[in-house]
Amino acid sequence: MAETMRDGIKLYRNGKYEGALTIFLGVPAGEPGNNLEIAYYVGLCYARLERYDDALLYLEQVVTADTDLARVYQCRMVLSVIYTLTGRTRLADFELRKLIEAGYESPQVFCSLGYVAFEHRNADEAMEWYQKALDIDANNSTALNGLGFVLADTGRDLTRALTMCKKAADDQPDNPAYLDSLGWVYYKLGLDVEAKAYTRRARDNAPENRVITEHLSEIMQSGRAPLL
């Protein structure tokens, strides 16, 4: 079994998730600890393959029964991502708060909570979480972009929002979310040429993204930016 597991883990780490999954699913049941390790890797493989409902079945086994805290923390983070992607943000919030209760605080956790709070239309709470992330890492691009977007979207502080979103976009110039946020700040500032340019770049990099498409549509229909 040990050699088989090593083969599966090697495939997983090399990004060959289908092959790794086949190996892990073929490992016979054994000791409870070994079964949890298999569940851990099977869940991760399903998550990588975007088979989210299958991933949940295995990752939830790990967070409820495993004694390996590092593995539990990672699975809770993956669960929170899956729940967010599938629109189950209340469950995402639950997993993230469990991490904080366990003392696992990181910019990633705080940024995820910020995103979930804003999805629930709680801008004040979202800004608090993003600021907590920045208190740990002042250059965290996700936190800079998230807080900048919330500030712009709510009209709180457009100058600070622009500074933050520009810094995030400078760090990752092809990131569609960052380009969209920067375009949205420019739109809120009334700088429609810049708003259109950045939001179009964001749309080109993520043509299926509904939020970016809606932002671009609003900018183009505002009557301030000329249609090309």
Image (spheres, helix red, strand yellow):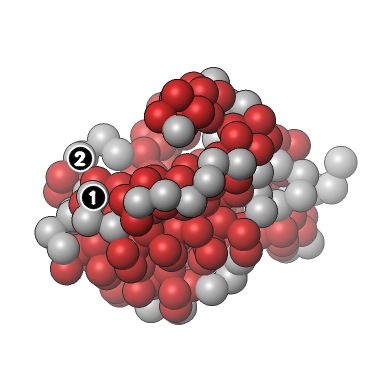
Give the structural element (helix, strand or loop) at label 1. loop
Q: Residue at x 66, y 30 (%)?
A: 19
- Residue at the extreme right: 228
Residue 165 higher or lower than 55, as above or below: above
Q: Position of residue 61 (x, y in %)?
A: 42, 63
Residue at 48% across, 51% down: 29
Viewer-nearest residue: 102 or 148: 102
Amino acid type at mark 2:
Asp
From what the image shows, is residue 35 above or below residue 197? below
The residue under label 1 is which amino acid type? Asp
The vertical placement of 191 against 81, above or below, is: above
Q: Quadrant of residue 95?
A: bottom left
The answer to whether any part of residue 212 appears in the image is no
Residue at 35% x, 51% y is 31
Residue at left offset 56%, top offset 56%: 55
Residue 127 x %, y %: 30, 64
Nearest to the observer: residue 168 or residue 106: 106
Mark 1 — residue? 68
Image quarter of the C terminus: top right
- Residue beneath disc 2: 137
Secondary element at image label 2:
loop
